[in-house]
Image: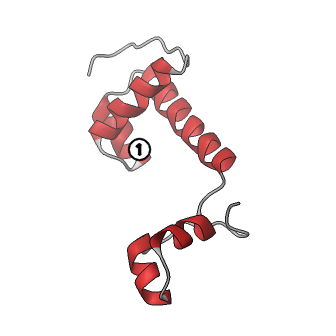
Amino acid sequence: MGAQTPARRKKTARELAEQFGTSERTIVRLVAEPRDDYTARARARRQQASELRAQGLKYREIAEQMGISTGAVGALLHDARKSGISVQEQASA
C-alpha cells in the first residue's frame, strides 16, 4: 500500500509521527512512494547520468546539470553499470 497522492515530503517520518501522535512506521506506510514509481524514477536518473557521461561531460558537469553531488554522480554511474546500462565513456573523471 502506498500513498493515494504521493508527494515528496519535507519532514522526516519521525517529525510527522510526533506531530500526529503515531509511530514512524505508520507514517512511512501511509506516505511511502509506490515501489514501481521509485524504481522508474531511479532508472531514469541512472539513464540521464549515463547519457550525459556518454556525451563527454565530467562528473562535476553532470552534478551541476542534475543538481546533485559528484559523489552521487559516481554512485549513479556505478549503479547504471551494475544494472546493465552500457555507456561508452569519452572523458575521464
Q: Could you say where residue 5 lies in the image, as x and y percent from the top left?
A: 70, 70
The residue at the point 55 percent across, 72 percent down is 26
Find residue 71 and report its horizontal and vertical position in percent.
28, 37
- Of 61 and 71, nearer the camera is 71
| Residue under the image location 39 percent in, 13 percent down | 90
Disc tally is 1
Relative to residue 35, is residue 68 drawn left or right?
A: left
Which quadrant is home to the C terminus? top left
Q: Residue at the spot x=28%, y=16% of the render? A: 92
Q: Is residue 49 above or below residue 68?
A: above
Q: Which residue is mark 1?
A: 65
Tell whether 64 sits left or right of 40: left
**Residue 21: where, in percent of width, then height?**
47, 88
Which quadrant of the figure contains the N terminus? Answer: bottom right
| Circle 1 residues within 10 Å: few <14, some 14–19, many ≥20 | few
Specify the quadrant of the image occupied by residue 53: top left
SS for tag 1?
Answer: helix
Q: Residue at x 60, y 48 (%)?
A: 38
Measured along the vertical axis of the image, is residue 85 above or below residue 63?
Answer: above
Quadrant in the rendering for residue 43: top right
For the residue marked with disc 1, what is the amino acid? Gln
User: Would residue 86 be found to the left or right of residue 56 on screen?
Assistant: right
